[in-house]
Image (cartoon, grey):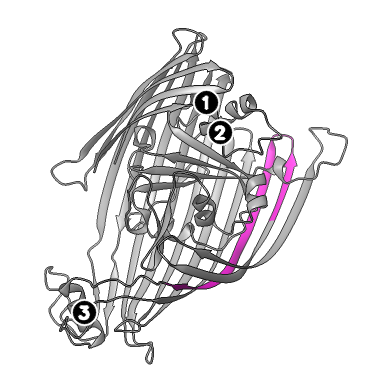
Amino acid sequence: MNAKILLVFFLGSLLAISQESMDELSLSALMDIQVTTVSKKAEKISQAPSNISVVTARQIKEWGVRDIKDLLKRMTGWPVIPDRDEWVFAVRGNVSDNNAKYLILLDGHRLNSIENFGPGQIIEMPNNLASVKRVEIIRGPGSAVWGPDALAGVVNIITKDAADIVSQGGDGNQNESQSGSQVAINPGLGFDDLSDGTTTLHNGGTFDFQTARLSGDAEVVFFASGGYSEGETVSQAKSAGFAAATDRKMAIAGGLPSDSATYPGYYETLLEKHRPGFMLQSKAKLGGLSINALSFSTETFNRHYESPLGRENYLTTYKGFVEGSYVVQPNSDQMLTFKLSTGINRAEYQPFADPTNLTNMVNIVWLDRQLMAGVDYNVSLYDNLNIGAGLDYTLTKTGPNQRLNKFNINITADSASKSANSVGYWFDPLLEDQQIGGYLQGKYSPIEKVNLVLGGRFDYNDDRGSDPTNINPRAAVIVTPSSSTAIKLLYNRGY
């Protein structure tokens, strides 16, 4: 799916309203804040060819948000709404299961997977976000640089460096080793009242530990964070009813009558959710060589009341990756970055559980593994021209996905790997997906205070059937008549 968006922005305050407190930074200073997500290079927020906001570490602390979901709910133009068992984004009406239309990044590394369970769970994981330095948020397409999954928006979670953690004591000698650690424990209790009459109650707590060591051009950082949350969602607006097919599906799974007159609507008025989770991350840097590793796991338990089935379900998610990068910077005008990473995503889902017999359920395991390699190059020519280019390759192996049917029912017989009335385990076949993409972008300033941006990205994905190619252009005219005002005419396309 493609989207074309044409926007005009004026007044720098709209671009920078989510920065540090206005009484501490001038508007012109806010306009000069550096962002890296839009063009994969550092540039002023007022000159970035997208509608982007930044949330700083100070704001995260002052707001007391528990997770990325709560943070994004505070952002103007980024609706976060409840949908069944999850929270989904709805920027400009773009809603999808597990937020598959939104690209989630951690330090520039893609967290989206083929099954998209990674982003869907990470945004809700209880975490006090003490390890986050800032979050950059793009509203609208970002595929002109990032490629797939960036149809409606991009969220880049940027974690702290060693210099942000180590103590500020000492004589300031750059060659002196410095170290520092921080621990935070935060219990919480709160509620949200939504416009549709829904009330959510939640409680729990988070912990965060971070330690770092800095010595010259070498640094090591380690984060450990996690927590537990539970809550209830009470909905006053009951659904008029689902399609008969939905009722029949529930009848098959739970042994209920398929007569839609008996169960005119499959609605849920109370949702109880328990969510423990943890995240471990380590970063190391020596000169131009950097290594970033993540291990993330969360488990979600949902119980629904006042529904025909009174059902429960579990979802356990694990995500891990290791990424290495090497930066070559021959001079201040050129930078070449090589990246290589490998990762794994695993999700186990147990839906339609019988509350009296938790062994009577369907069990599904999704698994995918990814190998990614890429290179980015940026060069400034003269004083008024900047060119950025990049090429990346991704190999994804999905499956064999395991399914366990304990209902002894005919779920499907549409594949040789699945049989009618199948009982026990069966496996979806192993799938392999290769994707290669490249982007090119130029920014030219013909006169002072005017910037013209033109670029785009080409992607080839052999899993897209008869239409494996995708082209997503970008164009922008950016005028900054004063230090506190920016006017942007933007065109971006995404998929």
Q: Position of residue 379 (x, y in %)?
A: 48, 18
Provide residue 314's location: percent of width, then percent of height.
41, 75
Task: Give the CA distance from mark 1 to mark 2.
Answer: 8 Å
Q: Which residue is mark 3?
A: 264
Q: Which residue is mark 2?
A: 16
Q: Nearer the viewer, residue 386 or 425?
A: 386
**SS at mark 2 in the image:** helix
Q: Are marks 2 and 3 in contact (CB under 8 Å)?
A: no
What residue is drawn where x is 55% and y is 39%? 54
The amino acid pointed to by label 1 is Ser
Residue type at mark 2? Ala
Q: Nearer the viewer, mark 1 or mark 3?
A: 3
Dividing the picture into quadrants, the one containing residue 489 is top left
Quickly name the residue at label 1: 46
Which residue is at a point 81% across and 41% down the rendered structure image? Answer: 168
The image quarter containing residue 407 is: bottom left
- The magenta-colored residue range is 210-234
Q: Residues within 10 Å of mark 3 (few under 14, many from 20)?
A: some
Residue 23 in view: yes
**Magenta span has 214?**
yes
Of residue 314 and residue 88, the one placed in the foreground of this image is 88
**Image location of residue 232, percent across then percent down:** 49, 74
Q: Position of residue 256 (x, y in %)?
A: 22, 87
